[in-house]
Amino acid sequence: MSQYGQATADTLAARAGYSEHQTGLAMDIGNASGTCALQACFANTPAGQWAAKNCRDYGFIIRYPAGAEATTGYTYEPWHLRYVGKNVALDMSSTETLEDYFGLEAAPDYLQ
Ligand SMILES: [Zn+2]
């Protein structure tokens, strides 16, 4: 991350201690081949397409959807799935953010 400035780095990965992965409710998925690992093009691979279509049936959402950076603070991460439970997942639209669903304020950056 040192090749990026802090502002850009913050949109690409969580700072230590702030990652949603630490909740135990998030996971990153990928293709066995490694194709498009941790890249937006993952969305266009078979695994990415399957996840987008079916993850909500298993209680997961794509936590950082495309075009929602101003709300979530993260660029599109089609590989990052967050468990919210089947009821919530199926109640959300495929492009809705967790912030919008729960009526929370946008979280585009770290509190200063
Ligand atoms: Zn992740």
Image (cartoon, rainbow, N blue to C red):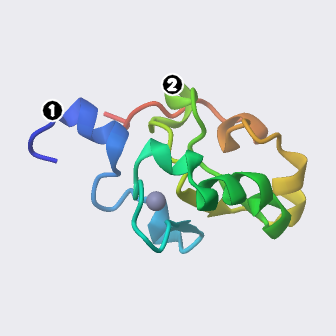
Q: CA distance from mark 1 to mark 2?
A: 18 Å
Q: Residue at x 56, y 43 (%)?
A: 64
Mark number displayed over residue 21: none
Q: Is residue 101 above or below residue 48?
A: above
Question: Which three-letter amino acid code belongs to the residue tagged 1?
Answer: Gly
Q: Residue at x 61, y 31 (%)?
A: 105
Mark number displayed over residue 70: 2
Q: Position of residue 28 (x, y in %)?
A: 49, 65
Q: Position of residue 14 (x, y in %)?
A: 35, 51
Q: Give the tally of numbered discs.
A: 2
Q: Is residue 53 above or below residue 5?
A: below
Q: Secondary structure at mark 2?
A: helix
Quick one: label 1 or label 2, which is nearer the N terminus? 1
* Residue under label 1: 5
Q: Nearer the viewer, residue 81 or 40?
A: 40
Left or right of residue 91: residue 96 = left
Q: Residue at x 53, y 68 (%)?
A: 27
Q: Tell me if the residue at label 1 has its CB under 8 Å from ligand 1.
A: no
Query: How many residues crowd mark 1 within 10 Å: few (<14), some (14–19), many (20+)?
Result: few
Q: Position of residue 20 (x, y in %)?
A: 48, 60
Q: Position of residue 69 (x, y in %)?
A: 50, 30
Question: Which three-letter amino acid code belongs to the residue tagged 2?
Answer: Ala
